[in-house]
Image: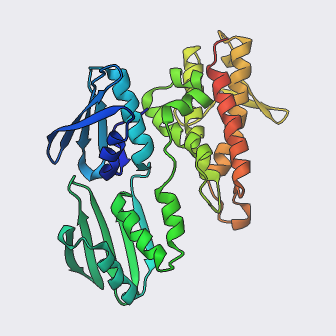
Amino acid sequence: MNTKNLTLDVSRIEDVLNSLDGCVCTKGTSNAKLVNYSIFRRADGANPTISVYHKEGGRTTLVAGPKDKIFGEEITAKIVEITQTTTLSNINDVIIVDSADFTQLLEELGSADKLTIKEISGGTEYTFNGEHKEKFVFKYYTKRSKLQLIGPPLTFLMQILASLDGMGYSATKKIIEKATEIAIDTPNLWDEYMPHTKGKMPQILQDIVEPSMIYVKVSIPLPDYASHLHPVLRGMESSMRQVLGDNGVVVDKDRFQVFTKSNHVYILDIDYRHGITEAIRIKVERCYNFYNKHRHSLFHASDEPMEVTRIEHREDALELLFESFDIMEELHAPI
């Protein structure tokens, strides 16, 4: 499990450690950047250490020490499971809030000593400064009664949303849902959807493709789901170039000149088949036909609105995503 650079509710970490069955937790070195804990399990004397590093922007990293490391990693995993609030890096949302309610909100927050306040055009900017370098900004524009929330989804954001929710502001519901998304373990996504592709694709391309797999796990209401396909289609282009290149076929930088159309489908031109096995040719042709069909229509738009291709339903986007994953896996699978 990933335990680095996470958004955690750090105020709950000690509660988790103190709740471990049959264990005693002792707090050691402590400063603004690092807190060390020692855990002693009575049953067998296991005594791991857990280091909590507070990073810039309110992120947290957990590290289990070398002693009794397996038990230590079990503890860090439990901390993440209980205290992780979101995988989102930033929130930028607006709620219309009556001025009297905003005054009440400030009173309920009760954190004036942690707020930096400055006047801005049309309103006031408030910056929450946490004890572990975390920051969250909210701006209130008086004339328009507009409250803007900006920053990482920390506990302080949840305090604001909880207060507004209590006042009956229904708009907070969508923000709360967004700010408490389920954590996605991207390495496991590769193992689930494209294990062969992962082993053949450089990290920079894995980073490009991963959003398409994340979209399978996270439902985001959109008027058009074409963007779900964009990452994997970019990876598909690179994979085809890689496989063709590995088999002695050089592809132009800006186009796939090696394919020709025959009976409404694209096939590898006969001039480029020397040295390529039948199995590889079939896999590459299947990949290119899918890529050619969807890449142009989903990446480009016409000046005629009725001619613009859209994917209006998430289920349709998921069907295409799963097909693209299968094609990529087939392309990279050993023969």
Q: Is residue 56 left or right of residue 102?
A: left
Relative depth, front residue between 34 and 42? 42
**Residue sitting at 26 percent across and 75 percent down?**
125
Closest to the observer, 278 or 322: 322
Where is residue 307 shown, x and y percent of the image? 73, 61
> In which quadrant is the C terminus drawn?
top right
* Vertical order, 182 against 109 (above or below): above
Residue 5 percent location from the top left of the image: 33, 42
58 above or below 291? below
Looking at the figure, which quarter contains the N terminus? top left
Q: How many marks can you see?
A: 0
Residue that lies at the very extreme toward the right in this rendered image: 263
Residue 79 visible in rendering = yes
Q: Quadrant of residue 108?
A: bottom left
211 relative to 73 in the view: left or right: right
Way the structure is coloured: rainbow
In the rendered image, residue 248, in percent from the top left (x then y), is placed at: 57, 14
Q: Is residue 121 above or below residue 330?
A: below
* Residue at screen point 68% across, 50% down: 297
Residue at (27, 52) in percent of width and height:
57
Q: Based on the displayed image, in which of its 4 quarters is residue 140 positioned?
A: bottom left
Residue 252 in sight in this render: no
Instruction: Please report the residue visible at 30 percent of the width from the left and 67 percent of the height from the top.
Output: 137
Residue 220 x, y percent position in the rendering: 59, 56
Please state which of residues 263 and 143 is positioned toward the viewer in this rendering. Answer: 143
Q: In the figure, is residue 131 to the left or right of 71?
A: left
Q: Is residue 18 above or below residue 222?
A: above
